[in-house]
Image (cartoon, rainbow, N blue to C red):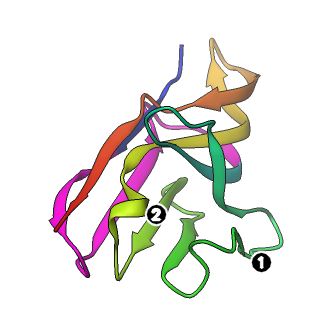
Amino acid sequence: QVQLVESGGGEVQIGGSLTLSCAPSETVFGVGPWTWYRQAPGKLRELVASIGGDNVPKYSDSVKGRFTISRDTVKKLTFLQMNNLNPEDTAVYYCHAGALEYYRNDQLARLHDLWGQGTQVTVSS
């Protein structure tokens, strides 16, 4: 079954930058809309940024002006560029795709509500 694979997490110092990426585990016909969430220890999962077919990005107030979500419609993946990171950004980040289409046995199949495995982002002082 097709899965979403995340990469790019790690540890940075305050003010640093990281770029997360999320891509299907195999070639797909289409995927989206994309959303990035994060979950800090002891807190609920929160929406960080999203982008759909209109390519209009949306952001939570806490990351607006610092994070940039984008999508590569050819490679069928998404990026989350994170700048000016602070300790409050420390969390596990998850990508989400609302739907995904792929070919299996010469037929177009569709999956809904896919999540990445999560990647840890740690911002230290």
Would residue 121 be seen by someone viewing this image from the given angle?
yes
Q: Is residue 37 left or right of residue 121?
A: right
* Circle 2 residue: 79
Q: Which residues are magenta?
A: 7-32
> Residue 113: which quarter of the image?
top right
Amino acid on which the number 2 mark rests in the picture: Phe
Q: Circle 1 — which element?
A: loop
- Marks 1/2: CA–CA distance: 14 Å
At 26% from the left and 82% from the top, the residue drawn is: 15
- Element carrying mark 2: strand
Residue at 34%, 40% in the rendered image: 119
Looking at the image, can residue 8 be seen? no
Q: Is residue 57 left or right of residue 81?
A: right
Q: Is residue 120 above or below residue 87?
A: above
Who's the residue at 36% across and 80% down the image? 83
User: Which image quarter holds the N terminus?
Assistant: top right
Residue hosting label 1: 56
